[in-house]
Each structure stands twice: as structure tokens, then as C-alpha cells.
């Protein structure tokens, strides 16, 4: 528990699953460091386990420590690696050692009667803390709102840990702000501790005033051939140095996200919906040399880190959605 994320490679040869027995045998599954530069999950688990000392946990904890090789370098992933949160069952990536490993792990977990699954992440841009769910299910909403009112429903990108485990138990992805912030560690630790103490997962319907629910409707990437700058230097796409301040801000049609090289032949961004379809023309236009939003949307995960933009995306676009009515079983 004294080992920093960058040092874990000294103890672990790769992705590793650790079990900490608890009084309630129905395990809480927690994954950390699926992205090696997102260290809050590891810091939260360290703090949590230290707080219990030699006492038995209230519930069994299954801890997956992910990309220790990337963590050593402080990177999301290494150049020769796939994204460790895109290789789970349901992925669209080619078969690899990582996809085989995640498929094996999901099958192993089917017989463990998991209580819940929590995947802990960070952002590189300015974002509030929020939770993500993959199913419109009251149990998932209840789990998410233990972290906060702000909840995002998404079904794209494919191959995420939370989506794979949603077939086994209620799941949530925690977005804990930037790595290295003590508040993020404390918030995640308190959430995990609350999950260890829960006796059952409530499934009675939430009230609409208890949740701010958003739906991710598009992922926005920058074309591989398009150059990017944030400092006003010439580039195909010149973005504002305060762009990430727009995260979780409801933008109206006409909002400007950047300026364009007039000689660039087409829009340098591509937006895909949940089905993977190209919906760029629904969201963006080029007007007077500017990249302009065509419809109401709220961005998340806007980042100023060009490496992250290249490895993942520029941002996601969301829309507010009403809380779905519960079915007679209390689930939807």
C-alpha cells in the first residue's frame, strides 16, 4: 500500500486481480489504472485499505489493477498497446492478448455473484466529478447518485469495462477530475467505502429532482491528417487555450469551438453517434473560417492534451434526458 502507481510494475508483471476477503462474501469489483495516467483509483484504494488496517472489510473486495506498464511512464497507454478500457467483451477492436484476457475475466466473474462494479477514472481537462452508467436501470442510477447528482448514460465507445460487467451486476464509471487532486481521491474513497457497507442495492425509483441525467449522443475525434494547435500557431484546427472550460456547459447553436485553416479541404473533426455512424454534419459547420456548433449540446472531456486527443478523442457531446420511468419490477 506504500507503492505509487508509477512503481507498481516492480511488483506486478501486468494486469492483476487481488482479492481482499470481507464479512459479506458478495464482492465489490473495483478496477483502477485501466488508463495508466489516471491514478485517483489507485490512490483511493490505497487510502481505503490503510483505513481498515488489519480489520476485516465489511464486504469482499476484488481489485483489478490495469495498465502498470503505462502507469510507469505516466501515460494513458503505450504506443504499442490498445486502450485497456476498449478491449472488453463487446469491443470493435481486433482480437488480441488483452481482449482474450478481459473475456476470460468476465467469465470468471459470472460465478462470483458480484454486488456491484466500479471503474475509477480521471479526466485531463476541467470537468466536474460525475458518474457514468451503461443501462437505464434504477439500481444503476442509485449506485451512480451515491457519487453525485451528475450522471451520464452512454453506450459508445464499445468495449468498456463497465458495459461488459453490466451483464453481471450494477456498474458505474467514476470520473474524478484530474489526477493528483486530493479531493478526487477522498471522494472516490468515500464512495467505495459506502459500497462496502451497503447491504442491498436499492432499486426503488429515484425522484427526478435527485439526478441530473445526460445522454452521450456523439464522440468527436480529430482527423489523423489534421494538425492541431492551442497557442495560435498555424494549424488545420486552432483551438482556444481555455477550451476545456466549456465542459459541462450547455452550448447553443452558433457556439465557436475553434478556427480553421482556409486551405484545409473539409472539416477536421468527425462526430460519430452511438451506432458509430458519421453525424458530423448534424453537429458542426464551417462558417467564416470557424468550427461552429449547429445544435444545442453539452461537451464533456474537452482536453488541451494533444496526446489524449490523438489516443482517444477531442470530446463527447451530450444532451439532457428525462429520468426513465420505472417498470413494475422497479428497474426501468
Image: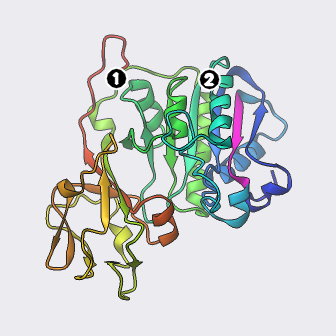
- Residue at 30% across / 15% down in the picture? 327
In front: 244, or 98? 98
Query: Which numbered circle lies on residue 205?
Result: 1
Element at badge 2?
loop
What segment is highlighted magenta in the picture? 60-68
- Residue at 22% across / 82% down in the picture? 262
Where's residue 268, x and y in %?
Answer: 31, 69
| Predominant SS along the magenta part | strand
The colour scheme used to paint the residues is rainbow
Question: Going by the image, does 283 lie left or right of 245?
Answer: left
The quadrant of the image that shows the C terminus is top left
- Residue at 40% across / 80% down in the picture? 229
From the image, tell me which residue sits under label 2.
114
Where's residue 131, x and y in %?
Answer: 45, 44
- Residue at 38% across / 40% down in the picture? 154
Where's residue 165, x and y in %?
Answer: 55, 30
Judge depth for marks 1 and 2 and give the one in front: 2
**Residue 258 visible in the shown view:** yes
Q: Is residue 81 above or below residue 65?
A: below
Amino acid at each position: 500500500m506504500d507503492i505509487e502507481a508509477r512503481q507498481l510494475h516492480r511488483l506486478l508483471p501486468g494486469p492483476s486481480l487481488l482479492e481482499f476477503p470481507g464479512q459479506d462474501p458478495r464482492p465489490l469489483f473495483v478496477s483502477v489504472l485501466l488508463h495508466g495516467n489516471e491514478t485517483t483509483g489507485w490512490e483511493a484504494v490505497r487510502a481505503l485499505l490503510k483505513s481498515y488496517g488489519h480489520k476485516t472489510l465489511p464486504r469482499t473486495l476484488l481489485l483489478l489493477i490495469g495498465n502498470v506498464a503505462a502507469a510507469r511512464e505516466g501515460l494513458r497507454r503505450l504506443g504499442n498497446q490498445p486502450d485497456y478500457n476498449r478491449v472488453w467483451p463487446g469491443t470493435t477492436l481486433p482480437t488480441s492478448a488483452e481482449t482474450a484476457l478481459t473475456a476470460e475475466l468476465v467469465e470468471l466473474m459470472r460465478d462470483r455473484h458480484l454486488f456491484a462494479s466500479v471503474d475509477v477514472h480521471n479526466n485531463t481537462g476541467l470537468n466536474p466529478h460525475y458518474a457514468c452508467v451503461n443501462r437505464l436501470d434504477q439500481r444503476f442510477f442509485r449506485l451512480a447518485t451515491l457519487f453525485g447528482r451528475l450522471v451520464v448514460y452512454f453506450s459508445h465507445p464499445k468495449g468498456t469495462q463497465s458495459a461488459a460487467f453490466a451483464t453481471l451486476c450494477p456498474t458505474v464509471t467514476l470520473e474524478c477530475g484530474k489526477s493528483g487532486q486530493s479531493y478526487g481521491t477522498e471522494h472516490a474513497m468515500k464512495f467505495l467505502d459506502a459500497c462496502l457497507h451497503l447491504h442491498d442495492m436499492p432499486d426503488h425509483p429515484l425522484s427526478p429532482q435527485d439526478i441530473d441525467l445526460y445522454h452521450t449522443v456523439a464522440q468527436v475525434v480529430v482527423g489523423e491528417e489534421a494538425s492541431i494547435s492551442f497557442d495560435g500557431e498555424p494549424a488545420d484546427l486552432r483551438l482556444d487555450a481555455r477550451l476545456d472550460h466549456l465542459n459541462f456547459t450547455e452550448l447553443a447553436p452558433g457556439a465557436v469551438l475553434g478556427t480553421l485553416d482556409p486551405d484545409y479541404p473539409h472539416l477536421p473533426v468527425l462526430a460519430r453517434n452511438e451506432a458509430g455512424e458519421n453525424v458530423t454534419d448534424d453537429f458542426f459547420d464551417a462558417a467564416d473560417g470557424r468550427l461552429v456548433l449547429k445544435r444545442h449540446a453539452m461537451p464533456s472531456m474537452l482536453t488541451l492534451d494533444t496526446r489524449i486527443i490523438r489516443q482517444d478523442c477531442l470530446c463527447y457531446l451530450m444532451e439532457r434526458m428525462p429520468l426513465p420511468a420505472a417498470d413494475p419490477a422497479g428497474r426501468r
